[in-house]
Image: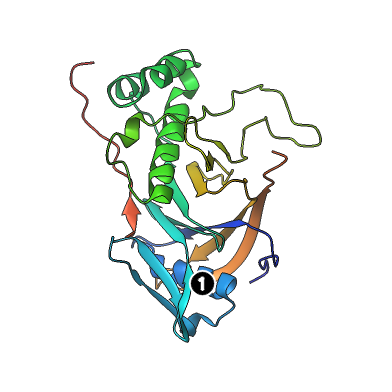
Amino acid sequence: MSQLPVPGRDTVYVWVGRGDGGRPIPAGRLLRRAGATLLGRAEAQIVVGHGPDGRPFVGASDDPRMELPVSVSRADRVVVVAARVAGPVGVDVERSRPLPALALARRWYAPAEAAWLAGRPAGGRAADFLRLWTAKEAVGKALGVGLRDGGLRRRMPVPAAAGAPRRAGTARPVGGGELRPVPGVAGLRVGHPPVGGGLVVAVAVVGAAAPPVEVVEVQVDGDGTVGAARRTGHVAAARSASTERTSLPVVVRGS
C-alpha cells in the first residue's frame, strides 16, 4: 500500500471501499488488506473470522497471538473497515438522506440531544441526526456492547456547528473531525473523519489519548478485487463483531 503505519504511533486506519457493481462488497477483502498493512504480513497469511462474541477477527496464520482490533460497517454498496493496532476501535457509516430527524431524535435520543437538534437549521438536521447516530453505533462497537442497555441514550459530543471557530492552521471547525471525549465516559472518544461521497462516518476509540485517523479510499470491482489505495484524509488528533449493518428505525409512531 502507499501509506504504511508509522512505528510507535497510535493511529486509526479507515478503509472506505466503494463498489462499481450491483453486488455487496465483500468485507473480508478489506479486512485482509488492513491485516496485511498493519500486521506486516502478506494478505495470504491473514486470517479473517469472528470471535466468540460475533465481532470480526483479524489475525496472522503464523502467529496465533497476533490479533488486530477491527470494526466493520456497511451502507448500500459501501463497506468501511477501521483498524487500530493499539486498542479497541468502532466504526459506523450511513448514507446522507432525508429523515424525520426531530421525530426520531425525540423517540430515541437523550432529551438534551433532541433539544440540540431542534435548535439546528432545518436543512441540516438530517445530517446532524446521522452524525449522532453513527457516533452512538461506533462507540457501542468500540465498547463491544453495540446499542444494548440504552446505547441510543448514551450522550455523544455534538457535531461542530457550521461556522464554528477554526483551529489555528487548519481549515476545519473545532471538533469537525478530531476524536473528542464522550461525555461521562473516561477514555472513550469519537469523531467524524471527512470521507465525502454523501457518507457520514464515525470512528470511536478506547484509550486515554486521541490518535490520528487516516482515511484510505479503495475501489472494489464487481468480482471483489480490491484496487489500489488512495489516501484521502488525515485527521490529526491534536489539531483538529460480525459485519455490522446499521439499523435506523424506519417507522416512528406517536411523537
Residue 181 x/y as whole percent: 55, 36
Foreground residue, 228 or 86?
Answer: 86
Please identify the quadrant where the C terminus is shown.
top left
Residue lying at the far bottom in this picture: please name it. Answer: 62
Which residue occupies 28% across, 65% down? 52
Residue 247 visible? The answer is yes
Q: Is residue 5 left or right of residue 132?
A: right
> For the image shown, how many numbered marks are present on the structure?
1
Foreground residue, 154 or 130?
Answer: 154
Question: 58 above or below 99?
Answer: below
Which residue occupies 69% across, 64% down? 8
| Pointer 1 local density, CA inside 10 Å: few below 14, some 14–19, many at least 20 | many
The amino acid on which the numbered mark 1 sits, given as a three-letter code, is Gly
Q: Which residue is mark 1?
A: 35
Task: Give the quadrant of residue 40.
Answer: bottom right
Residue 36 x/y as whole percent: 54, 75
Foreground residue, 99 or 105?
Answer: 105
Q: Is residue 152 left or right of residue 13?
A: left
Scheme of image coloration = rainbow
Residue 13 x/y as whole percent: 57, 58
Residue 26 visible? The answer is no
Residue lying at the far left in this picture: please name it. Answer: 253
Residue 95 x/y as whole percent: 42, 42
Please identify the quadrant where the N terminus is shown.
bottom right
Q: Secondary structure at mark 1?
A: helix
Q: Is residue 232 left or right of residue 140?
A: right
Which residue occupies 45% across, 75% down? 59
